[in-house]
Image (cartoon, helix red, strand yellow):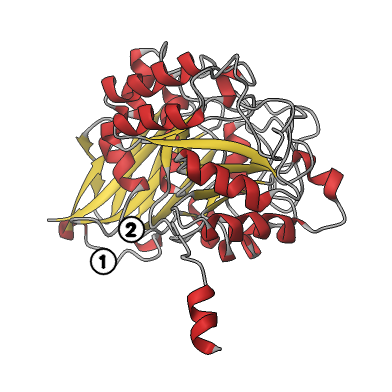
Amino acid sequence: MLLFAILAVPCLASVSPKKPQMGWNTWNSFKNNINESLIRSSAQTLVDSGLSGAGYTYVNLDDGWQAFTRDASGRQQANTTKFPSGIASLADYVHGLGLKLGIYSDSGIYDCAFYPGSYGYEEVDAFQYASWGIDYLKYDNCGGFHAGTHSSQERFRIMGDALRRTGRDIFYSLCQWGHQFPWYWADQFTDSYRMSGDIKSSFGDDSSGVCKTAYCLNTGYAGLSVLTMIRKMRELSRFQKPGSWADMDMLEIGTGTMNQFQEQTHLSFWAALKSPLIIGANINAINKTSLDILLNKEIIAISQDDAGVAVNYLPDLSTENKVQVWGGPLASGKSRYVVLALNYGLSSANITIPLSTLPGLNSTNLSDYSVKEIWSGKKACQQGSQIVLSNVNLNQTKVLVFSEK
């Protein structure tokens, strides 16, 4: 009987990512208006632009790929007008470029656009995705309210178990908007989880009704700005750990609403806070300034650092509505510490950072380190046992990396 039980256990796949995922998603720029041609051209652009070489390797279909009904066998099926070659063929094409393909579904009866959700079909859908060669599932919560007799934890866990039973490594990304505080439970069966409602393409202006802290719920199309996402992470950064990442939602870099300093700040904080780096712009038409920001190897290295530890907010060095200072350890190569200093006041500012106030930095002697400001590429200005940042522009973030000499 024991031998039978052992033989009956299926092969369980598991991703358990040691570093935050990187890639591109259709939703922010195209919503439901996606098709096979767009996905193929965007995948090719990831390669041609150097983005895939920098680590952006997931090509993720969001809502809008499906038909409005399941097939006669109860399986989800692609909209054949939008995707005439089918999803398996598209996966073959993406894999042929050295990339990975992601897909979208929902934990309810319907998804956000009323296409069929996976509630009650988790096993069927998981094995369908595996048979197509899917590498990533973004799993939403819009239709979850139609299946409200089951908790979020139960609905999302069922799909996680189904994905593992397929035997294929499929990255499992929850999109439940921070509902029921997933930082306390999602690490048990997911690879990443959304920590709040949707971002909007805005640096500092939220939609109406948005609350600023992590422990208030902004559901669905909440319309959170970049600054509000950063504010919420003050309470959540210590939950970040390899294997399950709090997701601050997609990057709005290249969508045309932010200046260069704001886009640099956006990527700097997503990287240092260990959020997934999923591009939301139309990469087929992205401008060079935004592309260069996304390609910054030293910022990406902070995201992908071996320590897997997010920076933490340092209130003693910060002034509300003027300056934020964050810091945390690094472990790759000779890098040992990173500091982010953001001026989000009303004008340019000088920011002074005493080394003795940086928790986790092993020395107060600057001679032990070389300190580089990443965006300028210059050595940081040192005065005694402190770093002095002069004339930091409005909405600019200075990123300081301390490396052993």
Quarter of the view holding residue 360: bottom left
Vertical arrangement, residue 351 with respect to residue 160, above or below: above
**Can the viewer see residue 362 in this picture?**
yes
Q: Which of 241 and 23 is in front in this view?
A: 23
For badge 1, the amino acid type reads Ser
State the quadrant of the C terminus.
bottom left
Residue at the bottom extreme of this rendering: 1
Precedes in sequence: disc 1 or disc 2: 2
| Secondary structure of the residue carrying numbered label 1 | loop
Question: In x, y percent, where is residue 341?
Answer: 42, 42
Q: Which of 132 and 356 is in front in this view?
A: 132
Q: Residues within 10 Å of mark 2 (few under 14, many from 20)?
A: some
Vertical arrangement, residue 338 with respect to residue 205, above or below: below
Question: In x, y percent, where is residue 401?
Answer: 28, 48
Disc 1 from disc 2: Cα separation: 8 Å
Question: In x, y percent, where is residue 355?
Answer: 33, 58
The numbered dot on residue 355 is 2
Q: Residue at x 61, y 16 (%)?
A: 33
Q: Which residue is drawn at 56% across and 57% down?
A: 190
The numbered dot on residue 363 is 1
For badge 2, the amino acid type reads Leu
Q: Are marks 1 and 2 in contact (CB under 8 Å)?
A: yes
Q: Nearer the viewer, residue 334 or 4?
A: 4
State the quadrant of the N terminus.
bottom right
Question: In x, y percent, where is residue 289?
Answer: 35, 17
Q: Residue at x 55, y 54 (%)?
A: 163
| Secondary structure of the residue carrying numbered label 2 | helix
Vertical arrangement, residue 135 with respect to residue 206, above or below: below
Give the number of marks: 2
**Can the viewer see residue 341 in this picture?**
no
Direction from residue 322 to residue 363 in the image, left or right: left
